[in-house]
Image (cartoon, coloured by chain):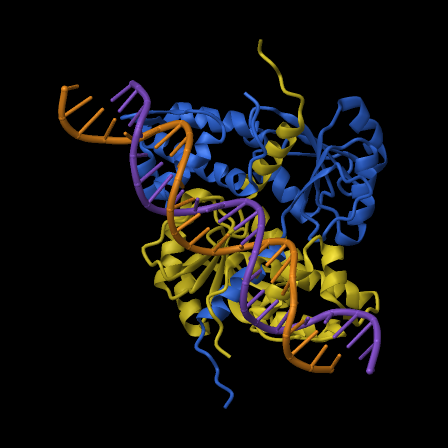
Chain colours: A blue, B yellow, C purple, D orange
Amino acid sequence: MKRDKISSNVIRRLPRYLRKLDDLAYHGIDRISSGQLGKQMGLTPSQIRQDFSCFGEFGQQGYGYNVEKLREEISQIMGLDSGFKAILVGVGNMGRALINNFNFNNYGFNLCAGFDASEDVVGKTINETEIFHIDDMEKFISENEVTAAILCVPRRHADNVANSLATFGIKAIWNFTNTELTLEDDTVIIEDIHFSDSLMYLSYRITETLPDEDDT
Amino acid sequence: MKRDKISSNVIRRLPRYLRKLDDLAYHGIDRISSGQLGKQMGLTPSQIRQDFSCFGEFGQQGYGYNVEKLREEISQIMGLDSGFKAILVGVGNMGRALINNFNFNNYGFNLCAGFDASEDVVGKTINETEIFHIDDMEKFISENEVTAAILCVPRRHADNVANSLATFGIKAIWNFTNTELTLEDDTVIIEDIHFSDSLMYLSYRITETLPDEDDT
DNA sequence: TAGATTGTTAATCGATTAACAATC
DNA sequence: TAGATTGTTAATCGATTAACAATC
């Protein structure tokens, strides 16, 4: 079944559904209606049914949705068992935090190496992930058919490294550099984690609630 | 000037404007029209003018916008010089990465302490930030009038700690626990950093570009 | 002044919500 | 069967884009 272009609003809700379904399964609940789900997630039943119907018919009239089946479908839709090969570039604090704590396998990726320029980390193995010198990256990417890169280098190197990665054949970049990447190759898929944007949003929301200072 | 309720779409674009304006200023450009800005950012001039006009009249007909003035206005709108007092709870890999690398001052906050339960870190000072025992948190919050908390504890403690923070008078939580927080106090402002959601989105986008496997 | 570009009102487009026939 | 709940079509709502008078 070929799917139409699906709005990114819908896609960005899928992980939330997944988390909720995991939670339900964990609590031993095996079926749920769009009405109940909506109440628990703060969405309308209509929206939930619309969202799911972008991808197929996962429910049953008069019954609702089977939690496990729905979870499986969404997981499939997002490609979470793809195991896309990924490397992490820039093994600083952030990089290390990800290598140590983040379970890439659960989210569609297989972290197969780290790269850095510093002799302090090159050659080490962190949480079962070997760290290589950045000069060996090109070779590694082509030999291992790496799909994605997690970019954690200092921001001044961001564009440079990103463009190299694109040249080496990387298809997607998860960008932690806090910059807007400017790539020559516009087919590379980029997903930004902008801590600062998020924190500024929080600042705005706090500011908003503060009593207005009237400068009369 | 009292502002209407402004859509979060607009607010979430403000940091992007800010980053672009910083970039322009850095390159010595001191004025720009909505047309030019739109071209550079991939937005329509209309949208840009609409966005700004939510907050006031920052431009000049026939001229455009003064980069520095606009930058200043947006910074003000987001409250980036507020210096809201913040504490970081949970000094693991993620917490440490933030303390070491993230410049809270630039984004409206003043990081004034860290808290953890482990004797390994309590008493230490990381990048000028002192780490205290979590049992001393309540006292610290009330004595120092702390507004916000950066939550980096393991997910199993997330709800517990978050609810404590709310009880202690925290107004906003920047949530790195990868869970949907369930708070009794619904006045607390929560901003989530969901790494997994972001990575799943990337997985989807890669999956989408893959050739369809026809299971005929 | 003439040209450029704003701020704002109106038109369009897309996303969310409501309604309802189909059916388990 | 009767009640519940889906998937989908239609209605509404909100956000983006276009148009244009105002004006620097």
Quarter containing the N terminus of chain A: top right
Q: Is residue B201 visible?
A: yes
Image: B55 above or below B121: below
Image: A69 above or below A170: above
Q: Is residue B147 left or right of residue B200?
A: left
Q: Position of residue B157 (x, y in %)?
A: 41, 46
Which quarter of the figure has residue D13? bottom left
Q: How many marks?
A: 0
Q: Residue at x 58, y 9 (%)?
A: B216
Q: Position of residue A80 (x, y in %)?
A: 55, 28
Which quarter of the figure has residue A136? top right
Outermost residue, right side: A135
Q: Is residue A43 visible?
A: no
Q: Position of residue B39 (x, y in %)?
A: 75, 56
Q: Is residue B156 left or right of residue A121?
A: left
Q: Position of residue D11 (x, y in %)?
A: 37, 46
Image: A131 above or below A83: below
Q: Residue at x 81, y 43 (%)?
A: A161
Q: Nearer the viewer, residue A117 or B34?
A: B34
Q: Nearer the viewer, residue B60 or A16?
A: B60
Q: Residue at x 62, y 75 (%)?
A: B57
Outermost residue, bottom side: A216
Q: Nearer the viewer, residue A189 or A177?
A: A189
